[in-house]
Amino acid sequence: MSARAPRRAIIVGGGIMGLSTAWALARGGAAVTVLDQGSIPNQRGSSVDQHRLIRHPYGASRGYTRMIAEAYRGWDLMWRDIGDTLYANTGTLALTASDGGWLADSQTTMAQEKIAFARLDPTTVARDYPALRADDLRQAVRVERGGVLFAAPIVARLARHLAARGVALRAQTRVAAIDAARGRVTLGDGETLAADVVVAAAGPWTGTLLPAMAAKMTPQRQVVVYLVPPPDLAPFWLRAPMVLDIDPETGLYVVPPRGGAALKIGDHVVAEGGDPDGDRVARSDEIARVLAAGAKRLLRLDAYRVAFAKVCFYDVSGDERFIVAPIGARAWAMTGFSGHGFKFGAALGLRLAATIEGRHAPEDTTRWATGEI
Ligand SMILES: Cc1cc2nc3c(=O)[nH]c(=O)nc-3n(C[C@H](O)[C@H](O)[C@H](O)COP(=O)(O)OP(=O)(O)OC[C@H]3O[C@@H](n4cnc5c(N)ncnc54)[C@H](O)[C@@H]3O)c2cc1C
């Protein structure tokens, strides 16, 4: 236990960020309590879906590109602790009908960071990935590492692991207010709890819990669509890489089925705001928009069956950079994960715990989390 390690910590939020931070602080010897307004896992939380992607291409961001190696190290440590590897490597296929843009930037950044990738020509893409449209391609890149984190199972398994090692998990316990100067939280029923440090990891509810943060992040409604491919394409998808097609108009991502999880498509377009406590029924126009994005890259999309669609929320910061910052002498906020935070969950938890324990300067960690290292 380091000299400045907290003896007691309270974590508000039992999503991947809160649980990873609880895990890392408990590893350091702290007595940790996790509070969640819902169940743990909370089906309405951003972390609870069949999968989340981890990939090297990151546009022009050298910081987030570099952090991917740290992200993998964090997961490896977590897999050792929980006794299970909840990840499948699929490789990454990034392609686009545009010149320049996100994928050109990603290639430049990966070259600078010495991350190996192969450029593919449209003929090769058409031959090796017959479910994909290739005739319009201007860029195509394959990276061998990258894949699927089984998100809901990770959160559930991590929660069980924490409970088994003595972390107190209190579900159905809404925090009404945080006294960041004194390290106290007031629960919805008026009870007060105190600790050496409080971490607020409230996902898209951050602005409600911490009104001062409301101007820095916005909840954004997103829809993902689960598909059943036609029988002749099912074997292809079982060995397919993740597919990213990001241009100025769409941010299509395709998550291949692995480990019992299904084929999913989504469109990383920051579309509309919304209320994470509101209805979670995907509207037909929302599903149609995602399918239209998918149809630009997946051949014969009309032969796929829509299994179901899921509504989930991003917590979007102005520039899509993460916010991990002290909000008082005894409290931190983690938010602004902008639809790309899950992959860094274990690494963010380890880094914040190490900072709270005095092994990093707070301002260095805040800067690191923005991807500006
Ligand atoms: C459709 C979609 C696709 C995504 N794809 C990817 C991807 O491919 N790769 C990737 O890296 N990331 C992805 N993300 C982003 C990633 O899922 C999120 O960044 C991450 O899950 C955020 O975790 P969190 O713990 O901050 O939030 P959450 O999981 O939402 O957890 C917050 C928790 O806080 C609790 N809470 C809130 N307020 C209170 C309160 N007052 N009192 C008590 N408890 C409270 C909530 O109940 C909730 O359980 C995606 C997100 C979405 C929505």
Image (spheres, rainbow, N blue to C red):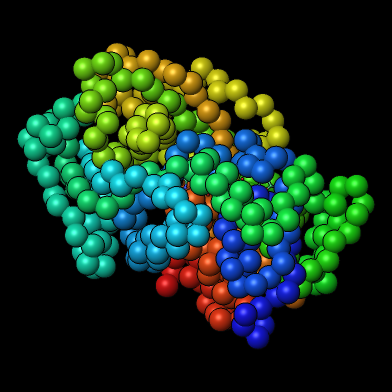
Q: Whole-percent x and y of residue 197?
A: 73, 70
Residue sitting farthest toward the left:
123
**Nearer to the camera, 145 or 118:** 145
**Nearer to the camera, 128 or 252:** 128
Which residue does the image show at 57% across and 44% down from the upper left?
156
Q: Is residue 346 above or below residue 307?
A: below
Q: Whole-percent x and y of residue 250?
A: 36, 36
Q: Is residue 283 left or right of residue 229?
A: right
**The N terminus sits in image quarter:** bottom right
Which residue does the image show at 62% across and 82% down from the upper left?
2
Residue sitting farthest toward the bottom:
3
Q: Is residue 169 left or right of residue 341?
A: right
Q: Whole-percent x and y of residue 56?
A: 31, 55
Q: Is residue 88 above or below residue 68?
A: above
Which residue does the image show at 91% across and 54% down from the upper left?
191
Q: Is residue 126 left or right of residue 185?
A: left
Which residue does the image show at 19% across and 48% down from the upper left?
141
**Nearer to the camera, 212 or 72:** 72
Q: Can the viewer see residue 344 in this picture?
A: no
Residue 357 found in image quarter: bottom right
